[in-house]
Amino acid sequence: MNTVRRAEIGDIPAILELLVQVDMVHHNGRPDLFRGPATKYNAEELKEIIANEKTPVFVCVNDEGKVLGHLFGMFKQELNDSVQTDIKTLYIDDICVDEAARGQGVGRTLYDFIKGFAKKEGCYNITLNVWCCNPDAMKFYENMGLVPQKIGMEHILN
């Protein structure tokens, strides 16, 4: 049975492998923007992120302890803003299921876990960004009940 737990320093090599997978999905969809193969964080940065309570990182592991997926969270809250309310949000900075484990419920397990975690932490909502060049992720998020909150648009000038 797969379980979700807080990421540990020993998980960093597996997390780095997953980050390359994430980058390659984006690189394949938008090679004009993503270098590929690369990671958005290095091992030293991951140590700091994992240790920071404001940026909780979780991994989904199988019975043997193999990391099947990760989820990077980030608490966001703008207090006393002149326009927006003071709600506390859990922003999903990164979520990835290992290519070999896709279709086995790992993503749902991670997302269900983070919903409960965010609620327990007093969050009003969960947000994330998804690239339009990643339709599988968009479909997954819609299946999890997420709906568009805002849309980023671009005009390439070449």
Image (spheres, helix red, strand yellow):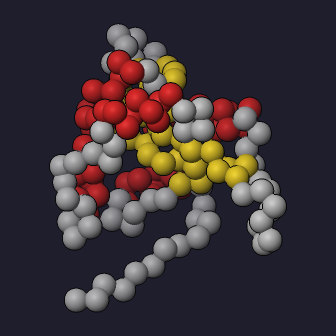
One can see residue 119 in this view: yes
Horizontal and vertical percent position of residue 90:
63, 46
Horizontal and vertical percent position of residue 68:
36, 27
Query: Residue 33 versus residue 60: which sits nearer the camera?
Result: 33
Residue farthest bottom in this picture: 158
Horizontal and vertical percent position of residue 31:
20, 66
**At x 54% / y 38%, what residue is drawn?**
55
Quarter of the image for residue 106 reads top left
113 sits left or right of 81 in the view? left
95 sits left or right of 16 in the view? right
One can see residue 28 in this view: no
2 up-or-down from 75: above or below: above
Horizontal and vertical percent position of residue 76:
64, 50
145 up-or-down from 30: above or below: above
156 up-or-down from 124: above or below: below
Quarter of the image for residue 14 reads top left
Query: Residue 64 versus residue 12: which sits nearer the camera?
Result: 12
149 up-or-down from 7: above or below: below
| Label total for image | 0
**At x 34% / y 43%, what residue is drawn?**
41
13 sits left or right of 53 in the view? left
**At x 39% / y 17%, what residue is drawn?**
62
**At x 22% / y 70%, what residue is drawn?**
32
Q: Quadrant of the C terminus?
A: bottom left
